[in-house]
Amino acid sequence: MQKPILLSPPHLGDDELKFVHEAFAANWIAPVGPHVDAFEAEFCERVGCGHAAAVSSGTAALHLALRLVGIEAGDEVLCSTLTFIATANPITYLGAKPVFVDSDRHSWNMDPHLLQEALEARARQGKLPKAVVLVHLYGQSADIEPILKACETYDIPLVEDAAEALGATYQGRSPGTWGRVGIYSFNGNKIITTSGGGMLVSDDSELVAKARFLATQARDPAPHYQHSEVGYNYRLSNVLAGIGRGQLRVLSDRIAARRRNFEIYHQALSTIPGIEFMPEAAYGTATRWLTCLTIDPTAFGKDREEVRLALAEQQIEARPAWKPLHLQPVFADCDCVGGAVSEDIFKRGLCLPSGSSMTDDDLQRVIEAIVAVHRR
């Protein structure tokens, strides 16, 4: 029985356990604490933002972000369609409605031209959205500058979902730090993990302070428990923040390992007819959190799903690219601007095992399995 090769498993370093031991030794287990404060400060330094609030998940961070920019019931929010459903779910938590925007070919992220056209059309109709949620997909930044300019033209807040893009760059800066507020995820499959956790960032100190307030059940300053508005139990625990501090110290190593995975895959597979890899946009550097490719079944000889199932037979986990949100049954009544590009990426796209702990033997096993499918 061959060992499973997972898509993107956690990869711990040397310092995580030390910080966890410190939390246990101090009996500081509950949410908030010195590791939380230190993790927020160290994270700000790493991504280049002014302020951060560590929370229980990337979804929680996005929920807070949307509430903080004023999203209410009945509002429309423009949102990337090629993404995990957690990007759009918080829009619905607040009673608002997502309107999805298709991807471009050169980054797989939101198409700036489609967004501009959508905003112009809605401005003419007098029904501008209340926010734009921009996803940075699979470790690569979207083309932020024209998207931010379009938002600023209509005074619409830009919320960046950088859950998959920690460590990437856009014009030398971190995605997630350009808009009104950004969020990151430390889920178990991300490039660094706290097992479960997230971070909300902004250069607006009052906004981040309000995020912390809302994330701790919106408790008013008083000796008793008093609450003037509804809050959430969203703060990160001191123990998990300790794991995050250790993980942050190895982020550069994890990026290097995942980019190396991509280069090995690319060198071995890019000459096979029908295989094309997710491009790296010229405006920045991708982490290659996941190595993604598309398969043309006519040229390759098999379709995406046949390849995935053949890998699964050999205990190799691979996954289709995200199913666009405008195709999800739960959002059947939501509009989409464009859609053909993301639909094609979903139909032909495959994410290969990309963990930073993969060995040369692991990579070769995946490569040989794909080559074998092609030769059948």
Image (cartoon, helix red, strand yellow):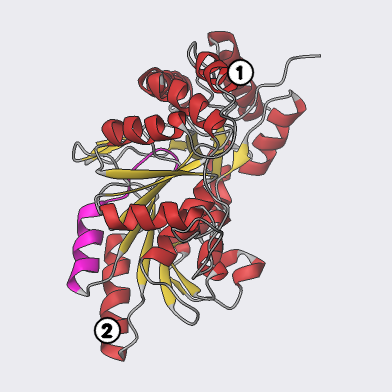
Q: Specify start and end residues of the magenta stretch as a single range.
A: 138-153
Q: Split into 4 quadrants, where in the image is the C terminus? A: top right
Foreground: disc 2 or disc 1 = 2
* Residue 199 figure quarter: top left
How would you classify the magenta stretch by its main secondary structure? helix
Q: How crowded is mark 1: few (under 14 residues within 10 Å), some or many (20 or more)?
A: some
Q: Outermost residue toward the right?
A: 1
| Three-letter code, disc 2 | Ala
Query: What residue do we see at 48% from left, 14% from top?
Result: 15
Indicate whether 360 appears above or below 7.
above
* Residue 311 figure quarter: top right
Res. 345 visible in picture: no
Residue 320, magenta (yes or no)? no
Q: Which residue position is annotated with label 1? A: 368
In depth, the one of 263 and 54 nearer the eye is: 54
Indicate whether 307 appears above or below 79.
above
The disc label shown at residue 123, or none: 2
* Residue 239 figure quarter: top right
Q: In the visual, does 183 lie left or right of 330?
A: left
Indicate whether 98 appears above or below 145.
below
Helix, strand or loop for disc 1 = helix
In depth, the one of 47 and 64 nearer the eye is: 64
Residue 128 appears at what percent x and percent y? 32, 81
In depth, the one of 264 and 260 nearer the eye is: 260
Query: What residue do we see at 29% from left, 76% from top?
Result: 119
Residue 366 appears at what percent x and percent y? 60, 21
Query: What residue do we see at 66% from left, 68% from top?
Result: 329
| Three-letter code, disc 1 | Glu
Helix, strand or loop for disc 2 = helix
